[in-house]
Image (tube, helix red, strand yellow):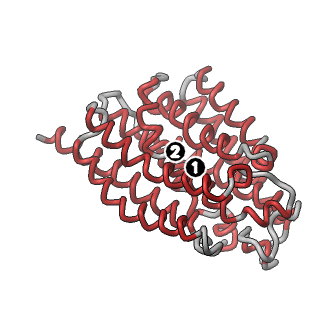
Amino acid sequence: MKKIFLAMRPWSFVVSFVSVLITAVGLAYMDYPVNWWMTFWAGIGIILFHAAGNTFSDYFDYKHGVDAEDTYGQVLLNTKQMTLTEMLHLAYVLIALAFLNAVALWWATDWNIQLLLIGGVGAVIALAYAWLKFHALGDLAIFANFGLLPALGTSIVATGMLTWDSLWFLLLFIPITNAVLHANNTRDTFTDSRAHIKTMPMLLGKRISQIIYYIEVFLPSIWTIVCVCVGVLPPYALLVLISLKMVINNCRDMKRYSEDNHAIDHLDEKTAQLQTISSGLIILTTAITMLVEKLF
């Protein structure tokens, strides 16, 4: 059981779940009627799809030689604790559960056509992810499937309507989500090149890749200030600025990458931790503000 749990890379789930939760909490603060049970259901759904994506990605990466013993790929495969067949079977089970959950959620929304279209686009991108990732389009896929589409889909599932107000919250989480992938790809530039695949850092070079990472991790804090100023988030959401210490530390690691290739060995995990803290602060402060306003 532990092996299955580790194979899904659960530390990464926060980057998908926050896309649902931040959107729902933000819409609730804007006085949209949010169904929290449906929101939780949608969150479980995106985690299932994320887990399936992780296992399929690890399967194809190892099969095609992208991940090997000298890379930071799936440890269970690299150390032979899990076979390729076992990983593939796990991926099939997870995608089946995710699909069944999606159909049930669609039924619960009275077969909403807009939700079907959003889910259909997401499914196509997910199926094409391996190809997209190998052709420097992984960042675009992540932006769509862990940012834009979940935000729009959550507005339908949580409120019963498609509202463009959900896009207010996109820049609160998607830049850091993309930064997780960007840190991973920047670190793996040599091994990815050896496997004849292309990623954004390979095309942009080390210096520009570093700058992009800096922008991605700083942008959510800046956007939080904007959202507070226009009244989309409560003033207490500015507590997210506490996470700037983590942002600065991560940026220092990325800066040291100029001289030390191992400086960012675990920066993807550190960036996921940053997502947990920054998104958690926004969600918590907004939820507490709404609760206090309701009680008093």
Classify mark 2: residues with Cα within 10 Å, few (<14), some (14-19) or many (20+): many
| Whether residue 127 is situated above or below residue 162 in the rendered picture | below
Q: Residues within 10 Å of mark 1 (few under 14, many from 20)?
A: many
- Residue type at mark 1: give it: Asn
Question: From the viewer's perspective, is residue 237 above or below residue 80?
Answer: above
**What residue is at 69 percent from the left and 66 percent from the top?**
7
Q: Is residue 88 visible?
A: no
Residue 100 found in image quarter: top right
Q: Find residue 257 and report its horizontal and vertical position in percent.
A: 59, 69
Q: Which residue of the protein is positioned furthest toward the top in this rendering? A: 113
* Residues marked 2 and 1 touching at CB (< 8 Å): yes
> Who's the residue at 66% across and 60% down the image?
186
User: In the displayed structure, does residue 64 sit left or right of residue 295?
Assistant: right
For the residue pair 49 and 236, the one nearer the viewer reads as 236
Q: State the residue at coordinates (42%, 46%).
A: 220
Calculate the distance from the C-alpha at mark 2 to the C-alpha at mark 1: 6 Å
Q: Is residue 155 above or below residue 215?
A: above
Q: Which mark is residue 174?
A: 2
**Mark 2 element type:** helix
| Res 121 seen here | yes
Q: Where's the C terminus, which quadrant?
A: top left
Q: Residue at x 79, y 45 (%)?
A: 135
Residue 132, how many percent across, how many down? 77, 43
Quick check: 130 left or right of 110?
right
Task: State whether residue 172 is above or below residue 11.
Answer: above
Residue that mark 1 sits on: 178
Q: Quadrant of the N terminus?
A: bottom right
Residue 277 point in image, percent of width and height? 40, 59
175 sits to left or right of 192: left
